[in-house]
């Protein structure tokens, strides 16, 4: 369960003035953050002002004791004035104003929901906290929960996971091109873990060291050429899928696009970074503008340092074989 701090957490005082209710910023110590769990809301009442607020993720409902207006000052400083009807109830959609802290649930089974390596709001404004709450907290969790159910009682896949970790499980479930039912969920858990680890706050820039040299060697136009190939792979993937930078089995850099859950692991290649082009990865922030999302990833989010570390490991493994 992720603890959210809706904008109401930032309200400073509640006061009735001339038949209306004014809501301004409330000190953090006066209102605990709403812990929003599936199917449960929390209601906070403010006597003697006759105002109650129900916090349900990004939807806030307030009930005033009398007719009038409710003025809300949001964290950005914008004032929202709502005329309260005779019932005294109004609603306004707002974005969560959270610290982005991650509370990781304990799943039933050997596969756990690993958190992104940064707070959920750390990639803003390029990727919103709301996107990560849904993408990591719901989509990836569903894959992990489903995979744990498929692993229950499956000694062969359980042994593959114990021996080779998640990567070994993905390859085993691929079953030499005849994937067993657990493949999609196993691959999606792996793909998402790598996607989060392919980004960092303040990312972008240019790669360094051996990876930079390999990019100059293997892509016409160097880094610009690599970015062009990743854009083409991401926008050219019809429907759902992924755009990858990989090291092949000889240590050469390649760009690959895959559909649905398929991963370069099943080709014996080493993924260095990946862009998720499933629509739920970007729709909340970019709507259907997939290219804009890919550009934001490449210009402002990609973690070249992490890709360099994976490249070094891949080259070392290739040399040892």
Image (cartoon, grey):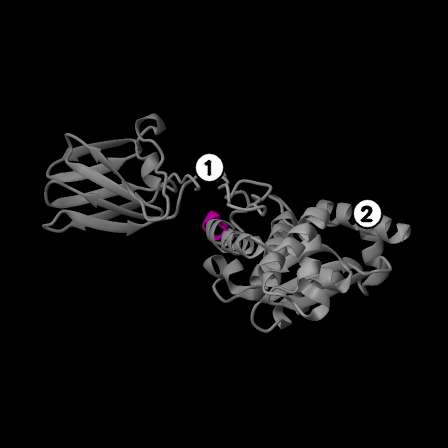
Specify whether residue 130 is painted magenta: yes
Seen in the image, is 225 located left or right of residue 155? right
Tell me the element at label 2: helix
Q: Magenta segment range?
A: 128-132
217, 112: nearer the viewer: 112
Q: Nearer the viewer, residue 32 or 227?
A: 32
At 84% across and 55% down in the image, what residue appears? Answer: 214
Where residue 44 appears, as percent x and y from the top left, is: 25, 36
Q: Could you tell whether 50 is left or right of 130 in the image? A: left
Residue 167: which numbered mark, if any?
none
- Please tell me whether residue 262 is drawn above or below residue 7 in the rendered image: below
Q: Image check: 25 left or right of 185?
A: left
Q: Kindly identify which residue carries mark 1.
A: 99
Q: For the N terminus, give its image quadrant.
A: top left
In the structure shown, which secondary structural element does the residue marked by tag 1 occupy? loop
Percent across and percent down for residue 135 are: 50, 54
C-alpha distance separating marks 2 and 1: 34 Å
Residue found at x 28% / y 50%: 92
Which residue: 60% across, 43% down?
201
View extreme (top): residue: 29
Lower sequence index among marks 2 and 1: 1
């Amino acid at each position: 369960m992720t603890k959210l701090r809706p904008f109401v957490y930032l309200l400073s005082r509640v006061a009735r003035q001339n038949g209306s209710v004014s809501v301004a910023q409330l000190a953090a110590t006066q209102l605990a953050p709403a812990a929003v769990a599936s199917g449960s809301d929390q209601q906070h009442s403010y006597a003697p002002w006759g105002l109650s607020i129900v916090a349900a993720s990004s939807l806030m409902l307030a009930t005033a004791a009398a007719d009038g207006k409710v003025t809300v000052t949001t964290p950005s400083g914008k004032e929202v004035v709502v005329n309260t009807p005779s019932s005294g109830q109004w609603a306004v959609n707002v974005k969560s104003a959270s610290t982005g802290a991650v509370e990781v649930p304990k799943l039933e089974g050997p596969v756990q929901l690993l958190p992104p390596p940064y707070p959920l709001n750390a990639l803003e404004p390029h990727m919103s906290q709301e996107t990560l709450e849904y993408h990591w907290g719901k989509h990836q969790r569903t894959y992990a929960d489903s995979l744990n159910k498929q692993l229950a009682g499956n000694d062969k896949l359980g042994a593959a996971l114990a021996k080779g970790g998640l990567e070994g499980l993905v390859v085993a479930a691929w079953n030499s091109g005849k994937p067993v039912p657990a493949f999609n969920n196993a691959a999606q858990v792996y793909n998402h873990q790598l996607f989060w680890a392919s980004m960092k706050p303040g990312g972008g820039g240019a790669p360094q060291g051996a990876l930079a040299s390999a990019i100059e060697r293997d892509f016409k136009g160097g880094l610009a050429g690599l970015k062009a190939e990743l854009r083409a792979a991401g926008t050219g993937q019809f429907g759902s899928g992924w755009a990858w930078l990989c090291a092949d089995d000889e240590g050469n850099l390649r760009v690959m696009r895959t559909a649905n859950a398929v991963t370069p692991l099943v080709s014996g290649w080493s993924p260095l970074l990946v862009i998720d082009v499933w629509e739920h990865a970007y729709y909340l922030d970019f709507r259907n503008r997939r290219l804009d999302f890919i550009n934001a990833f490449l210009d402002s989010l990609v973690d070249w340092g992490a890709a360099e570390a994976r490249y070094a490991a891949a080259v070392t493994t290739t040399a040892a074989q």
